[in-house]
Image (cartoon, rainbow, N blue to C red):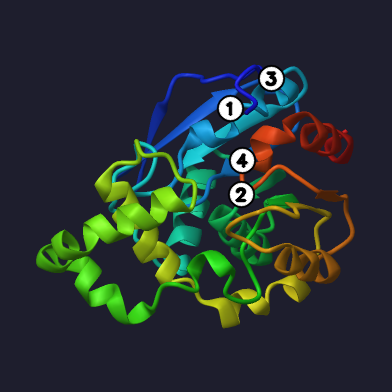
Amino acid sequence: MASHLPKTDPPVLQLTVQGQAIHYTDQGPRSGPTVVAIHGYPGSPKDFRYMGPHLEPELRLIRLALAGQGHSPPDGGTALVERVAFVRRFLDGLNLEGVMLLGHSMGGGISQAVAAEEPRVQALALLASVGLRKHKGLRWTSPKVLPALRSELGWRAMRPGIRQAFTGAGFAKTVDDESMRNALISALELDFPYLNTLPERISVPTLVAWTDDDALVEPEISEEIAARMPPGPRLHFSKGGHNLQKQHAAAISKELLTMLR
């Protein structure tokens, strides 16, 4: 465990854009480069707490809470296209320009989709990112269960087994039921054929980082993403699991700072 690592947890802020409440944290100098961090499913701004101390002295680190996750209300939608619109509204609301998107896991897929169509994104960093094809963490699932997940009766019946699967995959037992439900619906709605088209539509420098012992996204998928994405740092770690933004916070942050200087 790496509980001894320094971490930061800035206060959670709220921004209202087009009547929608969006929660986030904001730290570091306003005059430097800006990184917008997008967590996976389920997740929250705390997922990047170990990178904050390394980045904060030199750049502005904004950690976004996706709709239905990490404080933000669930009214932003669950489909990938809705997640992308949510991020773009957030960029509008804070008047952000020239940002780097830092995406972990499912947040990496969202970051790729935003970067493919958003000129305000000038750099991209993908940590244990999904993309191109279904990864092993989702192979036990099927989109056929979406109607049951959306119904209260079906959700009550499925919840114990889903919680067992989530905790077995390494997610914290403290993840609340609705965040877990929102996360699984969002994951099942991922459009992998669409994600497979994105690398050739992205033109900004891209960091790709992964580990060999990731229990959710196998290294072969990260290697495929790394091979097709635009040039940038490639960080391959033998160990660190799925949460490499914690276990390798210093090494990843060092490369981000080099990219943005």
| Res 53 label | 3
Compared to residue 156, the image places residue 177 above or below, namely above
Q: Which residue is mark 2?
A: 104
Residue for badge 4: 36
Say whether residue 256 is left or right of residue 7.
right
Q: Residues within 10 Å of mark 3 (few under 14, many from 20)?
A: many
Task: State which tag comes first along the sequence, 2 or 1.
Answer: 1
Instruction: Give the distance between the C-alpha atoms of the residues marked 1 and 3, in whole angstroms.
Output: 8 Å
**Kind of element beneath mark 2:** strand
Amino acid type, residue under disc 1 in the picture: Arg
Q: Nearer the viewer, residue 89 or 184?
A: 184
> Dot 4 surroundings within 10 Å: few (below 14), some, or many (20 or more)?
many
The local crowd at label 1, few if under 14, some if 14 to 19, many if 20 or more residues have their Cα within 10 Å, is many
Residue tagged 1 = 49
Q: Nearer the viewer, mark 1 or mark 4?
A: 1
Please report contact status of discs 3 and 4: CB closer than 8 Å, yes or no. Answer: no
Residues at marks 1 and 4, CA–CA distance in whole angstroms: 13 Å
Do the numbered discs 1 and 4 sit on residues whose CB atoms are within 8 Å?
no
